[in-house]
Structures are given as C-alpha cells and as structure tokens.
Image (cartoon, rainbow, N blue to C red):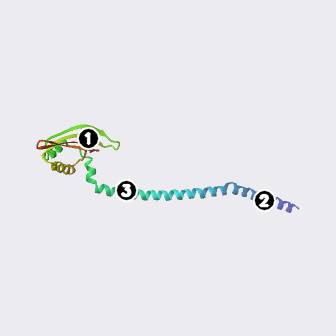
C-alpha cells in the first residue's frame, strides 16, 4: 500500500507539475512568441526601409557630386567677394558715363548676401549692352541683371538703367 500511496503522490505531483508548466507556457511563452514574431516582422520592415533610404542617399550623393563637379566654377563664384572697381573697369569697356550705386545688402535664409545696385550707363548702340551681359557672365561673381531695363534715347547715345544683384556666400 505504501508503494501505491507513493505512486499516487508521485502521479499527483507530476500532474501538478505538468499543469504548472503548461500554465507557464500558455501564460508567458506563447504570448512572448507572438510578440517576438511581431517585433521580428517590424524589424525586417524597418530594415527594408533603411536599405531603401540608404540606396536613395547613395544615389543623391552621387548626383550631388556630379553636379558639384559640373558647376564647380559657378559654386566658387559665390565665394568670390564682389570687386566694384573691376566691375566698373569691365563696364567702361562697353559704356560711357558709368555709374554704380549700391542700394541695399540683404541676407537670404540660405545664407547668401545679396548686394543690390542701380546701374546707370550710356552707350552708342544697344549691341554694347548685350556684349556687356556676355562679359558679366564671364566674371568671377554671380551677377543677376533685374528687370525692368530702361533704354532711353538721348541724342546720339542710349541711356541704360537697370537694377542688378550680386550674390555672395
């Protein structure tokens, strides 16, 4: 009887142990597995997005390097300080009565300093004005000639008035 009693106790303890283990599995392990699968799916989704963004960054970086090489001279022109004397020397090759009056200095949101000038020139022919524009494009600075451009006849000469902006970093 004692052996049967020990066997019954052993079976009851084994059954209790199995119930506790099964309860532990159902209460803690299975929900953890579900959460793990969910986190794993999120991880792979984020990994795919990171890979896609990384590839896009590489593409944009390559494109930016190509543009930097292609427009290096123009980008360097933003760093060159504006030399009024040199500008006036270039202007005098095309015009008489050259006047350059600085109106304003602005700073844009991108960090560019914008120097605004009013230019008053006179020339014999309007062709000189177009030659002047070509010469301005060859200068070391970034110069923008703004509209309106006023051309007015004064005797044998043409009076030319316009505003222009010079950009510098």
Which image quadrant for residue 35? bottom right
Q: Residue furthest right?
A: 1
Res. 44 mark: none
Q: Residue furthest left?
A: 156
**Label 1 residue SS:** strand
- Looking at the image, which residue is at 25% across and 53% down? 73
Residue position marked by numbered label 2 in the rendering:
15
Q: CA distance from mark 3 to mark 1?
A: 31 Å
Earlier-in-chain disc, 2 versus 3: 2
Secondary element at tag 3: helix
Report if residue 70 is visible in the image: yes
Q: Earlier in the sequence, mark 3 or mark 1?
A: 3
Q: Specify the quadrant that holds the C terminus.
A: top left
Q: In x, y percent, where is residue 84?
A: 19, 42
Residue denoted by label 1: 115
Mark 3 Cα-neighbour bin, 10 Å: few <14, some 14–19, many ≥20: few
- Comparing 48 with 23, the one in front is 48
**Apparent side of residue 95 relative to residue 29 in the rendered image (left or right):** left
Q: Earlier in the sequence, mark 2 or mark 1?
A: 2
The number of numbered badges drawn on the structure is 3
Taking 120 as reference, is 26 above or below it? below
């Amino acid at each position: 009887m004692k052996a049967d009693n020990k066997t019954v106790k052993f079976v009851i303890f084994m059954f209790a142990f199995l119930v506790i283990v099964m309860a532990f599995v159902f209460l803690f392990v299975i929900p953890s597995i579900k959460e793990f699968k969910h986190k794993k799916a999120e991880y792979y989704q984020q990994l795919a997005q990171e890979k896609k963004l990384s590839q896009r960054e590489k593409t944009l970086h390559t494109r930016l390097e190509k543009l930097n090489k292609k427009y290096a001279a123009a980008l360097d022109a933003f760093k060159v300080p504006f030399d009024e004397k040199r500008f006036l020397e270039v202007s005098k090759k095309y015009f008489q009565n050259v006047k350059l009056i600085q109106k304003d200095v602005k700073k844009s949101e991108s960090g560019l300093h914008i120097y605004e000038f009013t230019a008053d020139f006179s020339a014999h022919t309007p062709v000189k004005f177009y030659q002047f524009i070509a010469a301005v494009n060859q200068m070391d600075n970034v110069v923008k000639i703004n509209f309106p451009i006023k051309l007015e006849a004064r005797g044998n000469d043409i009076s030319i008035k316009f505003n222009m902006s010079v950009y510098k970093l």
